[in-house]
Image (cartoon, rainbow, N blue to C red):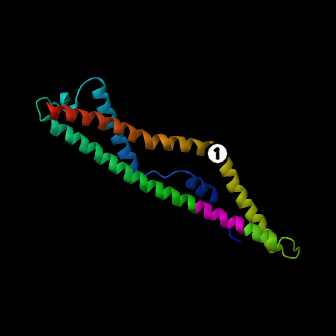
């Protein structure tokens, strides 16, 4: 009879918790900060060419080149964020498959034991295995029911964590491209 892995409760909680790589976190943060800053600058009717950064006065520099640099940086972080996020999604899908396969094997063994051996009173080995498998399965069910709210919140935060950086980036790119077109047309 297959049992769930040792330290099942610990492993189950780990598999229920979504994996997010450092690359995703860093690129999301950089993307959000840069995009939000650009949106804020244009929201107060300024341009990135009007800034003074690290003691450097950017006024008088080639505005189109500065805007292209900003667009390039934003696009780099967007691409890196999307690549890392895609990798994280693949890892999370595999974690989900691992958990489901462990549970499926346990369910199959419970069902098989129930059909073939449970009614045989002389076969105490299978009865003990069956009881053990049921206990392991109940641990999983307990975790799943306790984590229902966490799973709903996980979905909500997942949506926010992946759409907000993309939306702010699109907003920043909109302002940068409009500014670039204005600079080139003058």
Quadrant position of residue 14: bottom right
The kind of secondary structure the magenta stretch mainly shows is helix
Q: Position of residue 158 (x, y in %)?
A: 50, 44
Part of the protein shown in magenta: 98-108
* Residue 15 located left or right of residue 29: right
- Is 179 covered by the magenta stretch? no
Locate residue 172, reporting x and y percent.
31, 36
Name the quadrant of the C terminus: top left
Q: Nearer the viewer, residue 159 or 171?
A: 171
> Residue shown at 81%/71% (left/top)?
115
User: Does residue 3 appear anywhere in the picture?
Assistant: no
Quarter of the image that includes the N terminus: bottom right
Residue for point 33% across, 50% down: 79
Element type where label 1 sits in the image: helix
Picture layout, residue 80 above or below residue 159:
below
- Quadrant in the rendering for residue 137: bottom right
The residue positioned farthest toward the top in the image shown: 44
**Of 22 and 171, which appears nearest the observer?**
171
| Residue 104 is covered by the magenta coloring | yes
Residue 178 position within the rendered picture, expressed as x and y whole percent measured from the top left? 25, 33
Check the image and report above or below for 81 versus 183. below
Asked if residue 122 lies left or right of residue 90, the reply is: right
Identity of the residue furthest to the front in this view = 185
**Residue hosting label 1:** 148
Q: Residue furthest bottom?
A: 122
10 Å neighbourhood of mark 1: few (<14), some, or many (≥20)? few
**Left or right relative to 49: residue 99:** right
Q: Which residue reaches farthest right?
A: 121
Q: Residue at x 51, y 56 (%)?
A: 92
Depth check, front residue: 25 or 66: 66
């Amino acid at each position: 009879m297959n049992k769930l892995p040792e330290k099942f409760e610990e492993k189950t909680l780990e598999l229920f918790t979504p994996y997010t790589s450092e690359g995703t976190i860093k690129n999301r943060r950089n993307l959000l900060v840069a995009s939000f800053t650009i949106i804020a600058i244009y929201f107060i009717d300024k341009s990135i060419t009007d800034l003074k950064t690290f003691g450097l006065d950017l006024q008088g520099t080639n505005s189109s080149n500065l805007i292209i640099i900003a667009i390039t940086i934003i696009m780099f972080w967007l691409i890196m964020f999307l690549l890392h996020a895609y990798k994280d999604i693949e890892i999370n899908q595999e974690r989900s498959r691992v958990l489901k396969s462990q549970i499926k094997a346990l369910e199959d063994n419970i069902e098989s034991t129930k059909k073939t051996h449970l009614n045989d009173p002389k076969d105490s080995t299978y009865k003990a295995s069956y009881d053990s498998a049921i206990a392991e399965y109940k641990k999983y069910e307990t975790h799943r029911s306790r984590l229902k709210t966490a799973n709903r919140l996980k979905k909500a935060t997942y949506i926010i964590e992946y759409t907000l950086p993309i939306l702010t980036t699109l907003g920043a790119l909109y302002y940068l491209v409009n500014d670039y077109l204005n600079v080139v047309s003058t």
